[in-house]
Amino acid sequence: MKAGKDKVVSLHYTLTVDGEKVESSHDREEQLWVLLGHGQLIPGLETALEGREAGEALEVDVAAVDGYGERQEGQVQRMSKKYFPQANRLKPGMVTVLRLKEGGQRAVTVHKVGMSAIDVDLNHPMAGKDLHFDVAIGEVREATEEELKHGHAHPPGSAAH
Ligand SMILES: [Zn+2]
């Protein structure tokens, strides 16, 4: 079966940026399960998986524009320290997670730490970076009706929700 929209794919991946390993599913010893065609992956990776089959290994270069987007100017914002769970531990250059009022969360980069406020860069930490993925495809299967309804893959043994 070939990977494509509405198929579920399991994969191991290693992400390298500027020659340095950033993250790897091997560190978690668990494959990543994704439902294709539902925005679970960055566009460049979705495109690369199209038409691939179980057991294939591929190297994928993703330009920033097909990854986490280009960096945008004017994204530095001053926010009260109360929004940061561990405000006193933060230093410039660190990536931290901000809880959003409308729910959900967002990774931001600390720009400057003041007395009562912190300036953060709202660009995704990987914005503007060219990404290199080593991908090994485990399985390719049809998505279940439930997965299609939820818009994400359900890994084996995942709890009902
Ligand atoms: Zn679900």
Image (cartoon, rainbow, N blue to C red):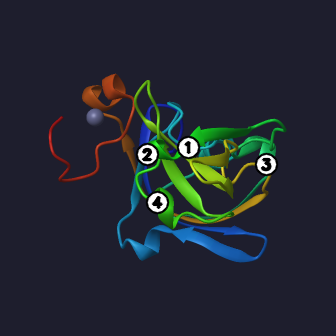
Q: Nearer the viewer, mark 4 or mark 1?
A: 1
**Can you say whether 129 is above or below 38 in the image?**
below
81 to the left or right of 78: left
Query: Residue under circle 3?
Result: 64
Separation of residues labelled 3 and 2 (CA atoms)? 21 Å
In the rendered image, residue 31, in percent from the top left (x then y), is placed at 39, 63
Q: Which secondary structure, mark 4?
A: strand
Determine whether, in the image, residue 138 is placed left or right of residue 53.
Answer: left
Closer to us: 122 or 124: 122
Return the residue nearer the eye: 121 or 113. Answer: 113
| Mark 3 sits near ligand 1, with its Cβ under 8 Å away | no
Residue at screen point 55% across, 63% down:
90
Residue at (32, 22) in percent of width and height: 149
Disc 2 packing (10 Å; few <14; some 14–19; many ≥20): many
Q: Which residue is mark 4?
A: 11
- As drawn, is 50 to the left or to the right of 103? right
Ranked by sequence position, the earlier of labels 4 and 3 is 4
Describe the element under mark 3 as helix, strand or loop.
helix
The residue to which callout 2 is attached is 34
In three-dimensional space, the C-alpha distance between marks 4 and 1, rounded to whole angstroms, equals 12 Å
Do residues under tags 1 and 2 come within 8 Å of each other at their CB atoms?
yes
Q: Say whether residue 4 is visible.
A: yes
The Cα atoms of the two marked residues, 1 and 2, are separated by: 8 Å
What's the residue type where badge 1 is placed? Leu
Sequence-wise, which precedes: disc 3 or disc 2?
A: 2
Q: Which mark is residue 41?
A: 1
